[in-house]
Image (cartoon, rainbow, N blue to C red):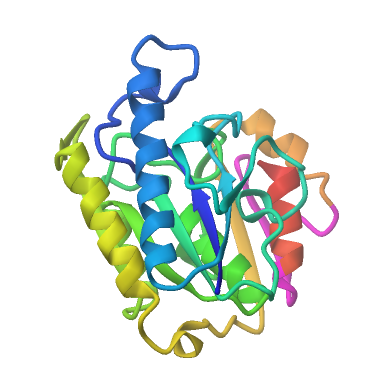
Amino acid sequence: MKIYISADIEGITGTTSWDECDIGHARYKEFQEQMSREVAAACQGAHEAGATEILVKDAHDSASNIIQAKLPEYTRLIRGWAHDPFMMMQDIDASFTAAFLIGYHSKAGSEGSPLSHTMSGKPARIWLNDEPASEMLINTYAAAYVKVPVVFVSGDKQLCEDTKGLNSLVETVAVKEGKGSSTINIHPDLAVKKISATAKKSLSSDLSKQILKLPEQFTLKIEYKEFKDAYRSAFYPGVEKLSERLLQFKTTDYYEVLRAISFMI
């Protein structure tokens, strides 16, 4: 069994402010450590379920956050960015049995976390087929594009609820809940235990039933915080400018959605 893991930091237990997610901040090391522990726990659970190969994508900011020595020896780690359209799902393909999303967070514009955003700080909000889009949605669709099911997601409570709304069969672990500028977090050790156990459980069912069927058409809308970012992105081929900060792109191929996002944000 071969498992793919995409990992972020804003959805691990504890992180509440942007400084704590910044590699240059004094508090960062505490949460770098916890991110590494939660990813390692997901690896351990998958291994106990029978996974013999695990590829981990460090998918936060510089993509150089996970402490590799904290991961089991049977894992491989992707650090840095190749800048291909799959972005946070770099190198996923049909050879993988399933995928996990660890440390993910609520979508841009959501009250689910004080760290809510989608892909970068430029968009105020992103929609896919008129549904507000999170990184979970974008990357679950990316996995589905290569026929790989996302079977386990960890992060904040709202993100987990959104995941269940997309696919009720996905196992989730909510390690925190956002309230205004605050978060209510479970203990770091408990998060590790829950993630390991749920990762193992997620691989025990018929995974073929969890591969999402992608829509036949896609309408991507991006509302930017700054009009200057919208102006620049409006030159991407096929983009329609709906207002000074709102752009639209339509296609029947989800890979083209990923390509557009990678260039536009």
Q: Nearer the viewer, residue 96 or 157?
A: 96
Seen at 69% across and 75% down, the residue is 94
Seen at 73% across and 77% down, the residue is 252
- Residue 13 visible to an observer of this rendering: yes
Seen at 77% across and 50% down, the residue is 84
**From which residue to which does the magenta span run?**
237-254
Q: Is residue 194 magenta?
A: no
Q: Nearer the viewer, residue 187 or 127?
A: 187
Q: Residue 204 placed where, x, y %?
A: 36, 81
On the rendered image, what quadrant is the C terminus found in?
top right
Where 8 sits versus 90, above or below? above
**The quadrant where residue 254 appears:** bottom right
Where 158 sits versus 81, above or below? below
Q: Residue 52 placed where, x, y %?
A: 55, 66
Q: Residue 68 placed where, x, y %?
A: 53, 35
Q: Is residue 137 left or right of residue 236?
A: left
**The quadrant where residue 89 appears:** bottom right
- In the displayed orientation, state which residue is furthest to the top: 26
Seen at 42% across and 89% down, the residue is 206
- Residue 105 visible to an observer of this rendering: no
**The quadrant where residue 166 appears:** bottom left
On the rendered image, what quadrant is the N terminus found in?
bottom right
